Image (spheres, helix red, strand yellow):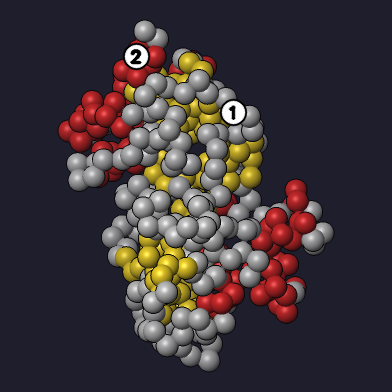
Amino acid sequence: MSLSPLFVEKSFDDLPGWNSDDHLPAFEAFRRSAFHVLNKPYRTGSLGVRFDAFAGAYDEARTVSPANRSAAKGFFERHFAPVQIRSENPGLVTGFYEPEVEASPVRTDEFTVPLLERPSDLVDIDDANRPRGMDDYLAFARDTPQGLVEYFDRSEIERGALAGQGLEIAWLADKVDVFFIHVQGAARLKMTDGRLCRVTYAAKSGQRFSGPGKILAELGEIPLEKVTMQSIRAWFRAHPDRVDEILWQNRSYIFFREANVDDAALGPVAAAKVPLTPGRSLAVDRLLHTFGTPFYIDTPSLTAFDGKPFRRLMIAQDTGSAIIGPARGDLFAGSGDAAGEIAGVVRNAADFYALVPRALVSESNR
């Protein structure tokens, strides 16, 4: 497999702000992936950044921990070469975070909206077991005596299709909070019994995601350029009688599993099976890219993270159904309300530079 023609070779001097970045937190994120792949390798994406080419970088990352930012910078420059990603669509970054909300272990008059665990009749499907005529997009189905059928969608589940099965992990007070937990794929729950616990993605009903921001823009309710998580929430607060009307147009429904909060400074364990690092973990299109790949993101119009133009080294450690395309990424902002304020306003044009193992660049030039 050769490298994609979308990759244009660059030097580190071509990366705006490269020398000013702090590469040490990016190294720590990369190192977590280096230990994980001892148990299970990452799948190589279709753009040709082969997993096996990371072996030398992963070996060093597991055995040597840089003492300072300069040493971390040297690590990435030794093992990788930058390529700029050129694609039909301009590069775009958005933000995501881990909400932190109050929840109850039991239903009460206040806490009435559940987070559900994976149902027993939800089946993973692929080309091997997909019924004839079923939408190729669907990766999950419902097992019935008559065979596999499309799973219940959001409106059916919220109207009781799975009631009485004991699937409730916790109960929340606000349907909109629950929806945004579905969008983010994880949450920290401050339980009414004093516990702090985490839920993270386990599966989904399988239908396509339809974001409420786009729906509200198409209805003329919010101008597209003003769609943020904050403006969407404000609209729902002003129109509580229309919440179901809008949210049920997103047929996809997310199921969760409980997880520990081992390190409060880190985010949930995501698709790359390592805890996310605030400001350094990136969600990418996993069909195109290889988890563990370092990306340098240049988006000077984005200043929400620290008041400075965003020019940072990130590590590909998550994915998402809305993250489609070679120059498309979701920046993990962290956990809690402050992180949500950052993530909710991120929608910025960006230049994407992938750091590719040097051996792959040499092979492509032969």
- Provide the residue designation for mark 2: 363
Residue farthest to the left, as pictured: 63
Image quadrant containing the C terminus: top left
Q: Going 46% across and 36% down the picture, which residue do you hit?
A: 288
- Left or right of 350: which side holds 196? left
Furthest-bottom residue in this view: 109
Q: Amino acid at mark 2?
A: Glu
Q: Are marks 1 and 2 in contact (CB under 8 Å)?
A: no
**Residue 98 visible in image:** no
Where residue 136 sits in the image (x, y, percent)? 50, 52
- Against 212, residue 118 (above or below) is below
**Which secondary structure lies at badge 2?**
helix
The residue nearer to you, when weighing 132 against 118, is 132
Residue 99 percent coordinates (x, y): 49, 63
Name the mark on residue 126. Answer: none
Q: Residue furthest right?
A: 220
Of the numbered discs 1 and 2, the one sitting upstream in the chain is 1
How far apart marks 1 and 2 lie (CA) works out to 22 Å
Please indicate whether residue 197 sits to the left or right of residue 156 in the image. Answer: left
Mark 1, other Cα within 10 Å: few <14 / some 14–19 / many ≥20: some
For the N terminus, the image quarter is top left
Which is nearer the eye, 69 or 64? 64
Question: Which image quadrant for residue 179?
Answer: bottom right
SS under mark 1: loop
Task: Give the camera-side residue of 179 and 19.
Answer: 179
> Quick check: 91 above or below 142?
above
Query: What residue lies at 61% left-to-right and 47% top-to-bottom?
Result: 346
- Where is residue 211 drawn, in percent x and y? 63, 58
Which residue is under mark 1? 87
Residue 237, percent across and down? Answer: 70, 73
Is 68 above or below relative to 124?
above
- Considering every residue shown, the one lying at the far top of the view is 366
